[in-house]
Image (tube, grey):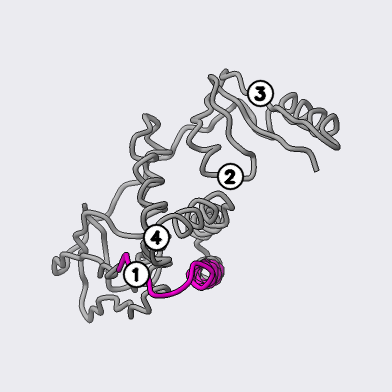
Amino acid sequence: MPICCWKKNGKCVTPESINQIALLQVRYNDTLRLIAKGPEAEEALIAFRQLAEDNFGETEEVAPPTLRPVPPVSGKAFYYQPVLCTVQAKSTLTVEEEQDRLRQAIDFTLLDLMTLTAKAEASGLDDIAAIFSGHHTLLDDPELLAAASELLQHEHCTAEYAWQQVLKELSQQYQQLDDEYLQARYIDVDDLLHRTLVHLTQTKEELPQFNSPTILLAENIYPSTVLQLDPAVVKRYLP
């Protein structure tokens, strides 16, 4: 396999990291270079050139968004705050044991995302299913695990502490972007961090239960939380 990297304005990222590609903020008419070397490098460049000529499968025509009227609702107001996991920095385990804990927690979270995707699809919520499919891609990023493993090696900390540092930094990088769509991806990263920490710390995630129409007030609410709440009772979400 060839060794490749995407390059824009002097910054290079690996194609295997969807997060690093997103942080490049590639826009229409931007110049994007693919640098490849090693076996099959020529084939990789030819394939990239063909994709570019085909506009990467996209058309220039974009349908204008359709604005739908929002019906009025009524219900009890409830201020929601997610339960935060307690993270200890100091570890009494070996680096290898902490790495195993982290890999296992990531695997459990990937399974969670597959379950959430299937649940959304079964409910006919294809747009929501696409969100969790995207979460799966964001989490299954080898650079994230590599960065956390490096912290484990150098700081001899817990898996949850290392993972929290890596994903918090990634979340901040998304928040600093000037593209509003990409900037909003920070909540997806925070959701992934929360779900992984739940597995690492074995925290029981208790969602609020409602028996009457409710309007949920929340500064931030994770997409995975929204899907698990009953839409027949929770009528609207307000920031």
Judged by its main secondary structure, the magenta piece is helix
In this view, 193 is above or below 143: below
Relative to 16, 186 lies left or right: left
Question: What residue lies at 40% left-to-right and 65% top-to-bottom?
Answer: 224
First in residue order: circle 4 vs circle 2: 2
Residue position for label 4:
193
137 or 141: nearer the viewer: 141
Q: Secondary structure at mark 2?
A: loop
User: In the rendered structure, are the residues bearing label 4 and label 3 in contact, judged by CB atoms less than 8 Å apart?
Assistant: no
Residue 107: in magenta span: yes
The spot of residue 102 in percent (x, y) is 49, 67
Q: CA distance from mark 1 to mark 3?
A: 45 Å
| Mark-to-mark CA distance, 4 and 3 | 32 Å
Residue named by callout 3: 33
| Residue 195 placement: quadrant | bottom left
Could you tell me which residue is drawn at 79 percent across and 28 percent down?
45
**Mark 1, residue position:** 231
Q: Earlier in the sequence, mark 4 or mark 1?
A: 4
Q: Residue at x 41, y 52 (%)?
A: 166
Is 184 placed above or below 202 here? Answer: above
